[in-house]
Image (cartoon, helix red, strand yellow):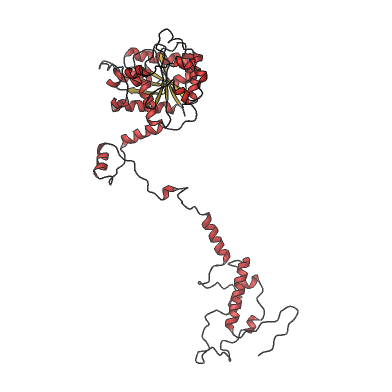
Amino acid sequence: MPAAATPNNSRTAPTRRSSWAEAAAVADAQAETEAQAEAGAGSDVGAAAPVQPGVQDSVPSPVPAAAPARPAAQPATAQPATPPATSRRGAVPAEPSTPPSNTTRQAAKLAAADAPVSDFITSPGSFVREQKPRPKGGFRGALFALTGGAINLGPGPRQREEDELGRRISRQLQGSYNTAVLSLKGGIGKTSTTVGVGLTLAEFRGDAPCAIDANPDSGDLVERALGEGIYQQSSPRTITDLLKNIDSVDSLTALARYMHHAGRLHLIAGEQDPEVSDSLTAAEYLRIRKLISGYYSVALTDCGTGVTHNAMSGILQSADNLVIAAGYAVSGAKRARSTLQWLASHGYEDLARNAIVVITDKDEVSSRVDKDAIEEHLAGICRQLIAVPHDRGVADGDLVTLDVLKPETRRAYKEIAAAIVDGYV
């Protein structure tokens, strides 16, 4: 056993090992400890911390004389499985099989945590393929039905347009809005437009709309929506009854006692007694409008004929947009233009500019009438012009229901409803 090295003031006593393998293991353990102490993956291990003294001196020659575990026949030049400790003194890179340090593992974990990960909450679409809408009608619909949905070409252009109209009608609104439907001439589709558009709004919107009959001339809004027979059988409460008891109406349940219902369209009937039908004032209408605004996001007001009756100033004051009813007869087109000009000259320029003109072919005018010229005459002085084709379900002046209308008529009412809601946002 060799004698221990003599200590001095600057070095500790070296530790003698019995073999170079033990010395290499000590050096490896010390290098790993230094790496964990943030010595840095690429730094020089020998320069970062002092090497244990005496280790290199204690490494014996490649073939020690007294190595009982080594076979005598093994060549003296055989390479050890673990590199000698002296290889750790320089900037020699680690073997490929060396496991990463804790610092490297921690950095990888942090990078993985920061990386965006799809989950069912934030991005459910990442896990489910988008499904095409089901086509309705036509070749696409027939092919879908024939193959049991295996072949889905999606909706055609016409259906996509219809779906877009439905999306515009059903959009969510913040607050309550009112659209006034008026004209200077009677019998040109004003009330039928109010009912048709109201039923269309009720079909597509999540909240029920309300229609108010403010016609001073015994309006028939509710009769057109319910049918004459059903209206007479029900309790014929009118706008006058509501005004008499308006102070006691403090809930939708209380208000419902004065309403009529055509499906999801809620209606307030106009006064039928000629002696009091023209007594609705602007202030009274505004009280009705204020009450309705607390329960309905969309209201339609059938104004009757003319723009100068008592309630009209209150209606225009509270209106968010207007629908001007017109016809293809020359007189009807002129009156529609006169209505817009009157509005613009009496302080309602914005209502006139953003008005929707609806031309209803109620009487199926002859071919002598140039419909295109009438439409062009009116289109330049309003926000949008929409034509409603001739339809017996509208022209007869009786019950208006969407089920019996032509597809073209229903499409026109959808366009009007979408244009109305567009004017709210």
Q: Is residue 71 visible?
A: yes
State left or right for residue 2 relative to residue 124: right
Residue 32: x and y in percent read 59, 71
Residue 220: x and y in percent read 37, 16
The quarter in which the N terminus is drawn is bottom right
Residue in view at x 37 percent, y 19 percent: 234
Q: Is residue 375 visible?
A: no
State left or right for residue 143 relative to residue 105: left
Q: Nearer the viewer, residue 293 or 305?
A: 293
Q: Looking at the image, which residue sits at the far right?
A: 9
- Count the marks: how many? 0
Q: Nearer the viewer, residue 409 or 222?
A: 222
Q: Nearer the viewer, residue 406 or 205?
A: 205
Residue 122: x and y in percent read 47, 47
Q: Is residue 257 above or below residue 157?
A: above
Residue in view at x 37 percent, y 46 percent: 130
Residue 67: x and y in percent read 57, 89
Q: Is residue 115 above or below residue 288?
A: below
Q: Quadrant of residue 379?
A: top left
